[in-house]
Amino acid sequence: MDVHEATPFEDYEDIVNRLRSLGFGAYSLNLADNFDLLVNNLKTEKPDVIFNFVELFYEEVTYEKNIAGIYELLGIPYTGAPPHALANCQSKILTKKLLRAHKIRIPDFVIIEKPADEYPHNLNYPLIIKPAYEDGSGGIDNDAVVYDHEAFSRRVNYILSDFRQPVLAEEFIAGREFNVSVLGEKDPVVLPISEIDFSEMPPELEKIVSFQAKWDPLHVAYHKTQPVCPADIPAGIAKKIEEIALTCYEIMGVRDYARVDIRINGKNEIFVLEVNPNPDLTEGLGFMRSAEYAGFSYNDILLKIVNFALERGKNLK
C-alpha cells in the first residue's frame, strides 16, 4: 500500500501560502528546539501576530505552555489558547478536577503517581488507562482498555515505566463518541458536531480513537474510525452537547478554536472526555471538517483565527 500523509511541515507551509494569498506577509519558523532562534527572530522581525502551532519543545509536550508564555512576555499577540489554558488542558488531572468542580459529568477516575504492589480502587470495569500528560492519543492503544485487575495493574505499570508520568485510570464509557468543535473568543459558536463511526471496527479491536487510529494509515483502526459530520443525533441531545461544550470552553479558558471530546452512554448521559486547545487544522479533517460543513472555507477559518489575535493585540497597545 502506497500511502502519503502530509507532514506537519507541509501543512504549515500550506497555511503560510494561504495567509499570503489573504494579504499577510507570512513566513514559517521552525524552532528546532532553539530558544535563542525564537527570541531573536521575534525581536528582529517584530511580527504583528503569531499563528501558534508549537505543540512541544525539547520533545516535551508540557513545554507547550512555556512558548506561549514567551509571546506573552514579549507582548506579541498570538492565536489560540493562553498559557494557563494550555496547562489546564495538557494535564488530564487538572482537566478532570476543573470540570468536576463545575459539575460537568466526567467518567469516574483515579490518579496513580508511582509504582506499588497494589492499586486499589472503587471504579467499575472496564477501565481505560492513559498517561496523564500526553495528547494526540499518546499511550492509548488497544490494550488501554482493561477488564480486570490483573490487566489494570499491568497497564498502569507500563505507563509509569515507559511514559514516566502519572496515570489516569477512568471508567470506560461504552457508547457513541463525538467531536465538538468550537470557534470564537468573546462569542464562541459550536460548529456542526462530528461523530466517530465505530460500526466497522473489527471485534478484536476496542471502539476507541487509539494512537494508531489517529496517526498510522497502515493500521486497520485508522480506516475503521471514520467521522460522520454532521452527526445523526436528536435535536434535544445535540443542544445539550452544544451547551456543555461551550461551558467547557469557558471553564478551561481556551479561545479562538478548540475541540471538546464527548461520549454518550446507552442512557443518553453525556460525559466529557477532554478539551483540546489549538486542535489540528488539516484541511478536510477534524476541526476543519466541521467548519467546512458550516459553510466556512479553509481560508475563512484562518482569517477568523488571525483576526481574533489581531483584535487582542489592539488592547496591548
Image (tube, helix red, strand yellow):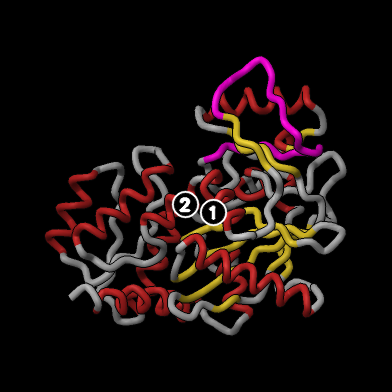
Front residue (pair 84, 201): 84
Question: What is the quadrant of the C terminus in the image?
Answer: bottom left
Q: Is residue 226 visible?
A: no
Task: Give the dominant element type of the magenta stretch: helix, strand or loop.
Answer: loop
Q: Quadrant of residue 126?
A: top right
- How many marks the image carries: the answer is 2
For the residue marked with disc 2, what is the amino acid?
A: Asn
**Magenta stretch, residue numbers:** 113-132
Q: Position of residue 106 (x, y in %)?
A: 68, 53
For the residues marked 2 and 1, what is the alpha-carbon distance in whole angstroms? Answer: 8 Å
- Choose mark 2 or mark 1, whichever is in front: 1
Drawn side of residue 80 relative to residue 292, left or right: left
From the viewer's perspective, is residue 232 above or below residue 254?
below
Secondary structure at numbered mark 2? helix
Decide if residue 32 is in sight here.
yes
**Which one is nearer the viewer's eye here, 105 or 221?**
105
Vertical relation: 17 (above or below) 84: below
Instruction: Tell me what residue is drawn at x 73 percent, y 74 percent.
Output: 238
Residue drawn at (26%, 74%) of the image:
313
* Residue picked out by circle 2: 88
Whether tag 2 and tag 1 are in contact, CB under 8 A, the answer is yes
* Nearest the eye: 168 or 230: 168
At 30% from the left and 65% from the top, the residue drawn is 50
Amino acid type at image mark 1: Leu
Of label 2 and label 1, which has the lower sequence position? 2
Give the left or right position of residue 82, taking residue 146 as reference. Answer: left
Q: Which residue is mark 1?
A: 98
- Which residue is at 28% across, 65% downward? 27
Residue 221 percent across, percent down from the top left? 73, 47
